Amino acid sequence: MHTIETKKNARYTVKGNIQSAKQILYVLHGYGQLAKFFIRKFNSIVSEEIAIVAPEGMHRFYLKSSGGRVGASWMTKEARELDIADNIEFLNSLHKEILNENKHASFSLLGFSQGGATAARWLQYGEIKIEHFILWASVFPPDLEQLTENDRFKTTKNSFFLGDEDQYFNLEQRIKTEKDLAGLNLNFDFILFKGDHNIHPAPLSLLVKKLEQ
């Protein structure tokens, strides 16, 4: 299979005032979501000091059949390595755009569900420096599990948020995930909240407190 490099327009959306924010939180959506809807889940924490930036996966598709609602994805198993590289290039370009508006804010990064793996890879291989990394109802990508002592997760605060009724994590999977994260020696703080596979206001309030620490 041959490849050719080409330009593509990528989308993102913002809540809050980027220029004046003291905290800027990047949020990467899950499979089949669009950034303009996903970012609404963070309305409760937007303030004069906190702004949210939601990039959108570059693979859009119809969620059912050949019409109706549209969703986006970060990648599939097909041409996976190319998609990883394209995602990191897009996110690096986005971060440069945001830095042009605000060079003094603290940055944090949240990946929800499918977006968690892309967020982790961006932190490790991309051109971004953050204070806090958050996996939310996601998994740590297995290709990053054998990292060196110089990996970037050693210098960030790391948290894992998971609902106690998450349909993708039964009790056995939840215990395994917590054990696997502990085995990475990256000091993940494991937060179990009441709720399903979604972003909920109550744990978001707890996240804000962590960002302010």
Image: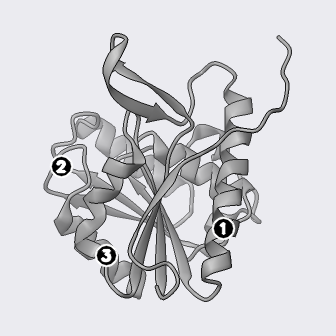
Residue at coordinates 28% horizontally, 58% vertically from top-left?
40
Q: Is residue 2 left or right of residue 88?
A: right
Relative to 61, is 18 above or below? below
Label 3, residues with CA under 10 Å away: few <14, some 14-19, many ≥20 = some
Q: Which residue is mark 3?
A: 46
Mark nearest the camera among 2 and 3 is 3
Residue 12's disc is none
- In the image, 103 versus 69, the foreground residue is 69
Residue 97's disc is 1
The disc, 2 or 1, on the residue closer to the chain's N-terminal end is 1
Q: Is residue 124 left or right of residue 53?
A: right
- In the image, 67 versus 161, the foreground residue is 67
The disc, 2 or 3, on the residue closer to the chain's N-terminal end is 3
**What amino acid is labelled 1 in the image?**
Glu
Horizontal and vertical percent position of residue 18: 49, 78
- In the image, 84 versus 3, the foreground residue is 3
Marks 3 and 1, Cα distance to the nearest angstrom? Answer: 20 Å
**What amino acid is labelled 2 in the image?**
Asp
Horizontal and vertical percent position of residue 175: 31, 45
Disc 2, disc 1: CB below 8 Å? no
The C terminus, quarter of image: bottom left
Disc 3, disc 1: CB below 8 Å? no
Relative to 47, is 157 above or below? above
Horizontal and vertical percent position of residue 156: 58, 73
The disc, 3 or 1, on the residue closer to the chain's N-terminal end is 3
Camera sees residue 71 = yes
Q: Which residue is mark 2?
A: 164
Q: Quadrant of residue 191?
A: bottom left
Residue at coordinates 72% horizontally, 57% vertically from top-left?
126
Mark nearest the camera among 2 and 1 is 1
Camera sees residue 140 = no
